[in-house]
Amino acid sequence: MMRRLLSCSFVIFCAFIHNANVQKIPTIGIIGAGISGTSTAHFMRELFGDEAKIDIYEKNNVGGRLATVAIGDHEYEVGGAIIHPKNMYMVNFTKILGLDQRSHAGGTLGIWNGEEVVVKTSKYKVVAMAQLLWRYGMDIYNIQNWVQTELMNDFMKIYDIQAGGHAYTSVTDLLAAMNPKFVDYLSITIKDLMKKEGYSDKFINEMVMGALRTNYGQTTDVPAFVGVVSMAGVDDGLWSVKGGNKKVPELLVKHAKANVIEGEVKVVRLVEEDPPLYEIDYKCKNCASANEIKTREYDILVVAKPLHPDINSIKFEGFTTEIKNFPHKYHVLTTTMIKGSPNATYFGLNSPDDFPTELLTGSDKIHFNSIGKQKSVNDVDGTSVYKVFTNTPLDKEKVKTYFNSEDDLRMVFWRSYPEYNFKADSLPPFVLHDKIYYVNAIELAASAMEMSVLSAKNVALLAHHHWTGNLDKIDEPFDIKGAADKTEL
């Protein structure tokens, strides 16, 4: 009888200890307060509850590569600018944060080949479609059916997958959960894939090249997956957030009740191994001493900034397995905002009024990637403000070549996106060490706001599953047919 009581007591004691570990409230540190870091904070708060302590480190401004610049009395987007209507996380963020959408509908499209504008569409949608059909035949219809219908439908499976609590430790497994062919798209160029699908050289060299140069500053030699994402970026129904896309991360961090620490993280140190305990050394931005280094401890860490050369300076100390920068380079892009009048004569047009709303380029020999007329973040359209994307800065002579007048000019330099010239097997993992996660791993497949947010959700799910011991939903196949028809995001 006594033996039975002792055995029972031992089981109860073990269960008590297990529950105590599960119910411990974690301290969570997030490095980087762009859309990746702030959406991670949001999902962490949802999963871990109100008691969890969440710190988020940012050495510059909350929002990261979502930023605006002032021209006169108005602000204009200079970072991530457009959102697809089927990007359900970003759509949902506007709802929970009380933000309004700003439509990018309307306008005209042109393509410049270095000598002439080979395409210039009407402002009337039916006429514009007829013009594109005349030049590209059924390619223009097929691309809508292929990218905007078939591939976007596959992409949208991620919402049911993540609503079901499924998470993945590798980028390729996450993509395969949506559709295994997405992984194949990492190993073939968009040019070769589209040729295989029957698209004409003219369409690939003009329309697809133009989309890639304006969206990523690169060519049709990039992997097909990022090429497909780029083509979705010239779809109908595109929008941005009224007041600026940066309002999403700015309000998300408040909604998540995360503590923003203004400072630069210098060192991540492993203090204890099992369970892991980490220290962060950071240079305090607003301390009395400009070079003062402070330290904080965390149970869970998330890196929400690129760990790549020329971008990252964080040192990882005390790890038996080395954590270091990944070798992939980031593409340097120059965004120049010009208030002025385009040089219609140079482009073979009758007047500045004939200049298309968006002028793409069909060759990497052309100095600029695209020129687009802009509305302010509050939808004001009364001034001639143009955004010029280039891979190298515009000099004065180039500005004079492209514009008759220049009343104001602002130039912003970005390490905007990865250089998409690597193999799928070199993609970074989502898990760097026990309870250290890397959100920006997803960028090496394709960089976009929604990609960053779904990666943040994946990382938050991984962290919660690892913390609670609920491992059966990590790297496991998901039966999409059994998912609910309506997903609560």
Image (cartoon, rainbow, N blue to C red):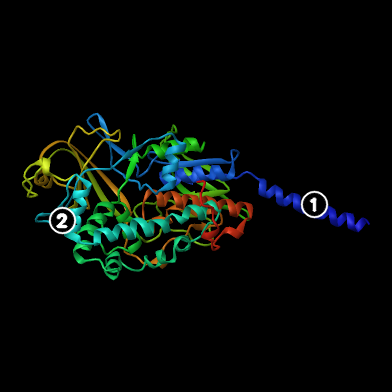
Residue 185 in percent (x, y) is at: 36, 65
Residue drawn at the location 75% of the way across and 52% of the way down = 15
Q: Nearer the viewer, residue 151 or 436?
A: 151
| SS for dot 1 | helix
Q: Residue 304, can we see it?
A: no
Image disc number at residue 455: none
Q: Nearer the viewer, residue 364 or 113?
A: 113
Residue 308 in percent (x, y) is at: 38, 56
**Above or below — where is 201 with respect to 404?**
below
Residue 19 in percent (x, y) is at: 71, 49
**Above or below — where is 44 with respect to 476?**
above
The answer to whether residue 387 is left or right of residue 86 is left
Q: Nearer the viewer, residue 348 or 422?
A: 348
Q: Residues within 10 Å of mark 2 (few under 14, many from 20)?
A: some
Look at mark 1 in the image and give the residue it sits on.
12
Residue 373 in percent (x, y) is at: 20, 41
Q: CA distance from mark 2 to mark 1?
A: 73 Å
Quadrant in the picture for residue 183: bottom left
Look at mark 2 in the image and give the residue it sits on.
366
Quadrant in the picture for residue 220: bottom left
Q: Residue 114, can we see it?
A: yes
Residue drawn at the location 51% of the way across and 49% of the way down = 486
Count of residue discs: 2
Q: Are marks 2 and 1 in contact (CB under 8 Å)?
A: no
Residue drawn at the location 35% of the way across and 45% of the way down = 65
The answer to whether residue 216 is left or right of residue 368 is right
Residue drawn at the location 47% of the way across and 37% of the way down = 96
Q: The residue under label 2 is which amino acid type?
A: Ile
Counting residues from the N terminus, which is met first, the one under dot 2 or under dot 1?
Answer: 1
**Above or below — where is 477 with respect to 347?**
below
